[in-house]
Image: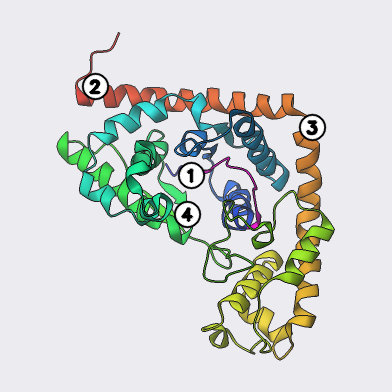
């Protein structure tokens, strides 16, 4: 059986990169896989301080974005992580399986902790083990990931293999990544060498899923570029990160490839390309944003979707966790 698991953190400022790199792909995966779990990973969010009221609001916002983009709660399991305690319980077992040396190699911890890693939380250091538990508590087989998450998925595979080896079983599956095409990693509008991020202090660095039509147009107009016209083929973008980013965003929104975009706009300057990109972004995002706003005003509905999804997820996780308990040697009622 093939089972998809993927998640998004509810840390506010849900943006275009989250949509193109994750949520839009989930909409497509639901047509190819019968068993999909899509999670708002609020346990991951609290590895750094979160205002409690904001965390609740942001959790609802991510769920609303999923539904508004076309992830069907009737066909998939949509839930927030903290409602299913099996995630945290399996994560502790994986804390005892994973090795410190493995976590020391995680580049994202180094990036997020910065120079003073001694002040980072233990949760931030160990959260790749929780990520492995998120997937394997359901025996997930496929995980849609961005390029920046591939290292964490490799760790999940290592943990599964070591657990299987330590207990002499073939219990956890080898998880396979699903990496998609154009704009799998959307970069900052202010710096083509940095990922579009919720935490960037400049709001102009990203297109938020709650931005107005005017805001989208203004941000794209102000996006950093270079003075050269667009090339006629993709090879011409190799040393032009900002140009490559904007072309990649257009290709992803238009559901085409970079070569097709350059065939249309090659030789033109950004004075012509940016308005076209703004129009494309507004056309594709506005219906989703309108539905998101409607859902955010109907918190009872969103909370009901998350609660129902959590009940379904917990029912899937319970027998797997029970088997893990037996394998490890825990006494159970």
> How busy is the neighbourhood of tag 4: few (under 14 within 10 Å), some, or many (20 plus)?
many
Q: For the stretch drawn in magenta, what is the main secondary structure?
A: loop
Q: How many marks?
A: 4
First in residue order: circle 1 vs circle 2: 1
Query: Which of 3 and 226 lies nearest the eye of the viewer?
Result: 226
Instruction: Determine the image quadrant of residue 190.
Output: bottom right
First in residue order: circle 4 vs circle 2: 4
Q: CA distance from mark 1 to mark 2?
A: 25 Å
Residue mark closest to the camera, 3 vs 1: 3
First in residue order: circle 3 vs circle 1: 1
First in residue order: circle 3 vs circle 2: 3
Instruction: Determine the image quadrant of residue 89.
Output: top left
Query: Residue 183 magenta-drawn?
Result: no
What are the residue bounds of the magenta stretch?
A: 7-16
Q: Which residue is mark 4?
A: 145
- Give above or below for 246 relative to 296: below
Q: CA distance from mark 3 to mark 2?
A: 45 Å
Q: CA distance from mark 3 to mark 1?
A: 29 Å
**Residue 221 in view:** yes
Q: What's the mark number on residue 297?
A: 3
Helix, strand or loop status at disc 2: helix
Q: CA distance from mark 3 to mark 4?
A: 30 Å
CB within 8 Å, label 1 to label 2: no
**Residue 139 in view:** no
Q: Which residue is mark 1?
A: 4
Coordinates of residue 272 in the picture (x, y in percent): 79, 81
Query: Which of 172 and 108 lies nearest the eye of the viewer?
Result: 108
Q: Which residue is mark 2?
A: 326
Residue mark closest to the camera, 4 vs 1: 4
């Amino acid at each position: 059986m093939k089972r998809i698991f993927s998640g998004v953190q509810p840390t506010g400022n849900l943006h275009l990169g989250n949509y193109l790199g994750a949520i839009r792909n989930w909409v497509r995966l639901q047509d190819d896989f019968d068993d999909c779990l899509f999670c708002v990973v609020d346990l991951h969010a609290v590895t750094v301080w979160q205002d409690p009221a904001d965390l609740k609001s942001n959790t609802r916002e991510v769920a609303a974005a999923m539904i508004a983009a076309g992830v069907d709660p009737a066909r998939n399991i949509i839930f927030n992580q903290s409602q299913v305690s099996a995630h945290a319980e399996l994560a502790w077992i994986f804390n005892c399986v994973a090795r410190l040396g493995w976590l020391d190699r995680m580049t994202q911890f180094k990036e997020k902790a910065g120079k003073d890693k001694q002040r980072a939380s233990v949760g931030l250091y160990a959260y790749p083990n929780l990520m492995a538990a998120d997937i394997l508590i359901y025996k997930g087989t496929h995980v849609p990931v961005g390029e920046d998450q591939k290292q964490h998925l490799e760790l999940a595979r290592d943990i599964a293999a070591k657990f299987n080896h330590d207990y002499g079983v073939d219990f956890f599956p080898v998880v396979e990544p699903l990496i998609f095409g154009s704009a799998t990693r959307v970069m900052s509008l202010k710096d083509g060498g940095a990922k579009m991020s919720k935490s960037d202090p400049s709001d102009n660095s990203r297109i938020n899923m709650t931005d107005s039509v005017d805001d989208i147009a203004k941000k794209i107009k102000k996006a950093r570029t270079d003075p050269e016209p667009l090339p006629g083929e993709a090879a011409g973008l190799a040393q032009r990160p900002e140009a490559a980013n904007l072309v990649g965003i257009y290709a992803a929104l238009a559901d085409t490839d970079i070569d097709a975009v350059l065939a249309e706009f090659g030789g033109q300057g950004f004075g012509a390309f940016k308005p076209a990109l703004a129009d494309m972004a507004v056309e594709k995002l506005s219906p989703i944003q309108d539905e998101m706003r409607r859902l955010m005003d109907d918190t009872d509905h969103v909370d009901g979707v998350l609660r129902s999804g959590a009940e379904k997820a917990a029912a899937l996780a319970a027998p797997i966790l029970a088997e893990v308990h037996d394998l490890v040697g825990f006494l159970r009622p």
